Image (cartoon, rainbow, N blue to C red):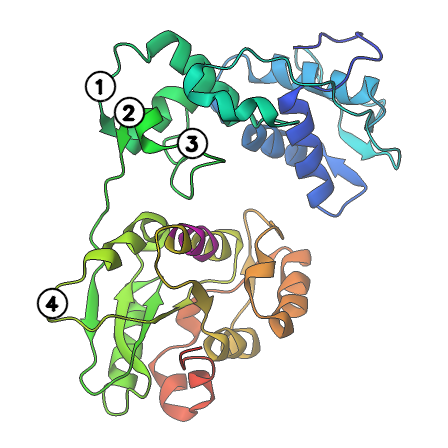
Amino acid sequence: MTVPGDAGAAPGPVAERLAELLRASGRTRIPRSAVRAAFLRADPTMVGSVDARRNLAAVLAELTAAGVIEPTGRTDDGSPPLPNSVKLLRAAPAPAPQDRTPWHAELSWASGLSRPSPTLLQVNEWLFRNAARAVEVPLRERALEITGDEKAFDGRLPGALSLETLRARRVVPPLHREPLPGGGPVLLVVDNVDTMDSLLRALRPEPGAVGGVAWGAGDAFTASVLALREAPPSEVRYSAIRYFGDLDAAGLRIPRRAGELAVAEGLPPVRPATGLYRALLEHGRPAAASSVDHADVEWLDPALRGPVRDLFAAGARLAQEAIGATHLAATPTWRTGLAPD
């Protein structure tokens, strides 16, 4: 890693990833708390590490030397001190040097990447140390061992990385779903169980295109979506998946990641239940959000993206329970977007 004061050196992989995350925030002046949060996303191995502050200071020095950021002159009183905020500069960073990483034979395909991700570099190091003696384990156990983040491989694996290379197996949790007799080929996945109950009661008399409602159970859906590959013979084979969850950073990240994995495994894409999200925007009660991330807003239909960006820009979120039994009984417009493609 570049040490502070190594002026002119190109940013390393973690520094480049941090720069990408800072630019994605859409802000010019970024406070220390947001910089620290982005750094932990760029390098999950630093979560809970005693070296996190020192490494963050070094990465900020890399970006400063490369002309990517300009730290404020005011700092906290930690050791080493961290700036109260950083300013993103308009100048583009210097191009990264050609990758000269010695790649393990099982990752030879990565030699053609101009910017291998930090996660891929961690896998490469792990292979050199452990490939000969590693035995197959559940994927989250391997992810924690390699990256320090047990959820690092929950979605689609990066590049041509395979389960075989990781000596891991993907454990698919059950996806609880309730059929709707007389319904169609659409599976409606709902983040929270109370909203699932209300939707089941609202849909049973007239299910329309919806043949079943499933409980996504939060982040579990990023893995349990694969349970649809082996549906029991008695269950309809769904040709479309619609999702309804909270309007916050996690609520959009979950269906986006689940959808990427679903498509990679030959399942239908996960698309938003547009009418339910529109109703939530119209009738939900905004609450303060602990974190705001615009990265997954593009998963929504175009007409919803602007209002959701405005919601997030205000530091707010909406809980899906606002669209409960009373609202579902009062108006049918929430059914928009539940038909198959």
Which residue is identified by label 3?
Answer: 161
- Residue 286 coordinates in the image, percent (x, y): 56, 66
Label 3 vs 1, first from the N-terminus: 1
Q: Is residue 261 left or right of residue 14?
A: left
What residue do we see at 36% from left, 28% from top? 143
- Residue 181 coordinates in the image, percent (x, y): 17, 84
Label 1 CA crowd tier, 10 Å (few <14, some 14–19, many 20+): few
Which residue is identified by label 4?
Answer: 233
Q: Nearer the viewer, residue 70 or 133?
A: 133
Label 4 vs 2, first from the N-terminus: 2
Whether residues under marks 1 and 2 lie with C-beta atoms below 8 angstroms apart, the answer is yes
Tell me the amino acid under the disc marked 3.
Leu
Whether residues under marks 4 and 1 lie with C-beta atoms below 8 angstroms apart, the answer is no
Label 2 CA crowd tier, 10 Å (few <14, some 14–19, many 20+): some
Tell me the amino acid under the disc marked 2.
Arg
Label 4 vs 1, first from the N-terminus: 1
Region in magenta: 255-261
Identify the disc placed on residue 135: 1
Q: Is residue 186 visible?
A: yes
Query: In terms of secondary structure, where does tag 3 sit?
Result: loop
Front label number (3 vs 1): 3
Q: Is residue 6 left or right of residue 217?
A: right
Q: How many marks?
A: 4
Q: Nearer the viewer, residue 264 or 34?
A: 264
Tell me the amino acid under the disc marked 4.
Pro
Query: In terms of secondary structure, where does tag 2 sit?
Result: loop
Q: CA distance from mark 4 to mark 3?
A: 32 Å
Q: CA distance from mark 2 to mark 3?
A: 11 Å
Q: Quadrant of residue 52?
A: top right
What residue do we see at 74% from left, 48% from top? 26
